[in-house]
Amino acid sequence: MDPDSVAKAFVEHYYSTFDANRAGLANLYQEGSMLTFEGQKIQGSQNIVAKLTSLPFQQCKHNITTVDCQPSGSGGMLVFVSGNLQLAGEQHALKFSQMFHLKPTPQGSFYVLNDIFRLNYA
Amino acid sequence: MDPDAVAKAFVEHYYTTFDSNRAGLANLYQDGSMLTFEGQKIQGAQSIVAKLTSLPFQQCQHSITTVDCQPSGAGGMLVFVSGTLQLTGEQHALKFSQMFHLMPTQQGSFYVLNDIFRLNYA
């Protein structure tokens, strides 16, 4: 599968899971995974999922505008996403950018080693 | 030097060089470096600098809003930047996000292996 397709498939899977069942993101992270969420640094799958499931909204919908990817060396892949995030009940969607560093698993899939999320304020 | 300080120093150096002498960015890239600039993929220091020096403006000023960094494994560092880009003569600044994957050089410095740039449109 070509890298762009892998990146696209990952992005679709990640945000569908996020929007439907945030706890389901747990198997995309491992112990050494790192998330920086709006400047807050979190490490390890458990803590990352705890952070994401405790975000102060019930429902949200990510709409993806751009996906760029590049190989990061040693089988890894960098994925750079921009889009907007609609929170249920809010009038205006938030704009965001996010980067993922994916590493291959022995099962032939990918997990997220690095994850950095930033809102893009007007 | 702590990673956050390294990232900050790199970002300052990168954008200062970009804003004063784009050709001077050449020694921050190597043969295997990759740039994706607004979706266009470019490889190698020479081609990357050719692209950056041919951008359709004489002068610009980057103003950095946020810098996040994480170790990428194997001594590498991921740096995620957001800010604004003021082109001389334009009334409104452009918003952008950019990610760098820095790898250590033998001289104890860093070079850019991966570089992805996107404007954040309103």
Image (cartoon, coloured by chain):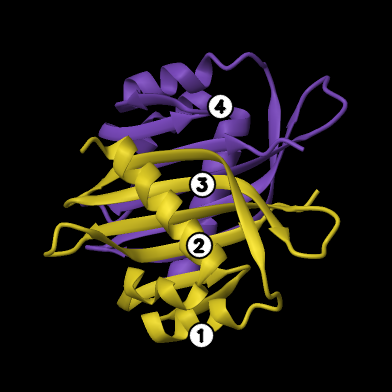
Chain colours: A yellow, B purple
| Residue A8 vs residue A122, the one in the foreground | A8
Indicate the amino acid at tag 3: Val
Q: Chain of mark 3?
A: A
Snapshot quadrant of residue B56: top right
* Residue B105 appears in the rendering: no
Mark 3 — residue? A81
Q: Chain of mark 1?
A: A
Indicate the amino acid at tag 2: Ile
Mark 1 — residue? A50
Q: Tell me if label 2 and label 4 are in contact, CB under 8 Å.
A: no
Q: Which part of the image, by quadrant, shows the C terminus of chain B?
A: top right
Mark 2 — residue? A116
- The mark that comes first in sequence, 1 or 2, is 1
Q: Residue at x 30, y 52 (%)?
A: B103
The x and y percentages for residue A106 are 11, 64
Mark 4 — residue? B21
Please determine if labels 1 and 2 lie on a single subunit.
Answer: yes
Q: Chain of mark 2?
A: A
